[in-house]
Structures are given as C-alpha cells and as structure tokens.
Amino acid sequence: MIRKSNEESLKEVIDQLLDTYRLRDKLNQVKLIRSWDKIMGEGISKRTEKIQFRNDTLFIYLNSAPLKEELNYGREKIVKLMNEELGGDYIKEVIIR
C-alpha cells in the first residue's frame, strides 16, 4: 500500500522544477507571447513590437504613441488579464515603451 504523504502530483513536481531551475519566467513569457493576440485583440497586437517578462514585470513595446498613452491608463487591467491567463499572480507591474 502506498502512503499518501510520500506522493506528490505531477503538477507539484513540475512547479518545483520550474522554481528550482528558475525557468518559470521563461515559460510565462512564452505563454504571454502566444496569448497576447487573443487577450489584447488584433488592433493592439499589430502595433506591438515585442513583449518581455522578467522579475515580475511585463514590458510591452509598441510602435504607436497614442496606443502607448491609452494602454498606460489600463495597466492594472492588463496585469489582471495576463495573470488570469498564466493562472497565478506572476505579473506585478506593466511598463509600456
């Protein structure tokens, strides 16, 4: 008979590996890039040059000054949407450039 106390779910083991080898930020960046179009829409996606995620901060590089200004007002909403997509509280700040 296997004791429950020695068992860990596959998800728990993978989470431990991601944290141990500091791969979570890289994995989250890949998820964000793949989800960006769906979450933000085609109009914003077309004006996005790149997005980066490091140290709890999402950097968004845009090629439209008016869009930069508009998204600056919605940074909290972007944090909320992106964290929902990632399934955790990983993004603390959004910087738009």
Image (tube, grey):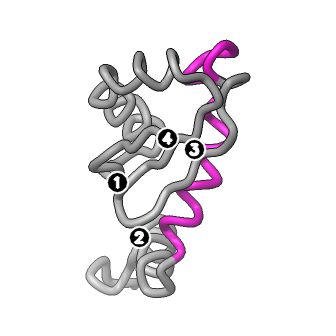
Dot 4: element: loop
The residue under label 4 is which amino acid type? Arg
Image quadrant containing the N terminus: bottom left
What is the CA distance from the residue labelled 3 to the residue labelled 4? 17 Å
Mark 2–mark 3 contact, CB under 8 Å?
no
Residue that badge 4 annotates: 97
**Label of residue 12 in the image:** 2
Give the residue drawn at x 33%, y 21%.
74
Residue 41: x percent and y percent?
Answer: 62, 16
The residue under label 2 is which amino acid type? Glu
**Label of residue 32 in the image:** 3
* Among numbered discs 3 and 4, the one appearing first in the sequence: 3
Dot 2: element: helix
Q: Is 24 contained in the magenta span? A: yes
The residue under label 1 is which amino acid type? Tyr
Residue that badge 1 annotates: 90
Camera-nearest residue between 12 and 49: 49
**Label of residue 54 in the image:** none
Residue 95: x percent and y percent?
Answer: 39, 44
